[in-house]
Image (cartoon, helix red, strand yellow):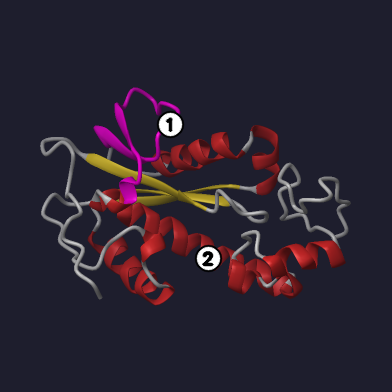
């Protein structure tokens, strides 16, 4: 694996920091997942980087390392019906909040990937654009969110194999959209999303 030592171990050295990131925001189907990770200040992992820059094999190798060595970690989930009710931006925030709710170790500061966040309790936060490629804790959260969501999509694929979710993970690939056009939607599709560019209104067939 390539060496990614440029990632920073923390923003505030003297605070307990939790990194947060989400996975699945741009998908047409499935839940959005988010992870919160608190790493020890001396955590070292040269291979860790933004999950999008890693192969599936690399992510799967890093996940048990992160889960074992983190001081605390958790994953939050927001399902498609909730996404349709509150929109994907708020669902992403809610998934992060649900992950933070499960932490046993109380963070004193939050590092959030992106440029927006809904305040969590009274804990101060810093939003960081492309933070998953800048801070170890956010990168770790991106790996956990992505790998846990991929596992979930593999389970859904067993129920609906025609949508190719074991490959596209619910993202808007050509094959995914062709299958929606041919077979209709499932209860796992996000009905407020543009599932087919030429037809926003699709009937629920499964």
Q: Image height check: is 140 above or below 100?
A: below
* Mark before the other along the chain sequence, 1 or 2: 1
- Picture residue at 63% right of the left edge, 48% below the top: 79
Q: Which mark is residue 117?
A: 1
Residue 150's tag is 2
Q: CA distance from mark 1 to mark 2?
A: 24 Å
Indicate whether 34 appears above or below 165.
above
Quarter assignment of residue 90: top right
Q: Are marks 1 and 2 in contact (CB under 8 Å)?
A: no
Quarter of the image with the N terminus in it: bottom left
Left or right: residue 10 compared with residue 31: left
In the shown orientation, is residue 179 left or right of residue 50?
Answer: right
**Residue 123 sits in quarter:** top left
Chain part drawn in magenta: 107-132
Question: Image point 31% across, 69% down: which residue?
Answer: 62
- Above or below residue 14? Residue 190 is below
């Amino acid at each position: 694996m390539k060496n990614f030592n440029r990632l920073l171990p923390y923003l505030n050295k003297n605070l307990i920091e939790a990194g947060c990131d989400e996975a699945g925001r741009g998908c047409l189907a499935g839940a959005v997942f988010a992870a919160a990770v608190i790493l020890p200040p001396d955590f070292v992992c040269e291979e860790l980087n933004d999950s999008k820059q890693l192969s599936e094999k690399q992510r799967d190798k890093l996940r048990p390392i992160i889960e074992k060595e983190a001081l605390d970690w958790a994953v939050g989930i927001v399902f498609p019906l909730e996404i349709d009710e509150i929109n994907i931006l708020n669902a992403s925030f809610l998934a992060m909040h649900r992950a933070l709710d499960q932490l046993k170790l109380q963070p004193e500061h939050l590092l959030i990937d992106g440029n927006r966040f809904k305040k969590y309790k009274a804990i101060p936060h810093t939003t960081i654009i492309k933070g998953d490629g800048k801070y170890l804790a956010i990168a770790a959260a991106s790996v956990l969110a992505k790998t846990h969501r991929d596992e979930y999509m593999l389970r859904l694929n067993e129920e609906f194999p025609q949508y190719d979710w074991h490959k596209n993970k619910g993202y808007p690939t050509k094959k995914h959209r062709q299958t929606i056009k041919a077979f209709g939607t499932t209860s796992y599709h996000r009905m407020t999303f543009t599932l087919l560019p030429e037809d926003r209104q699709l009937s629920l067939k499964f």
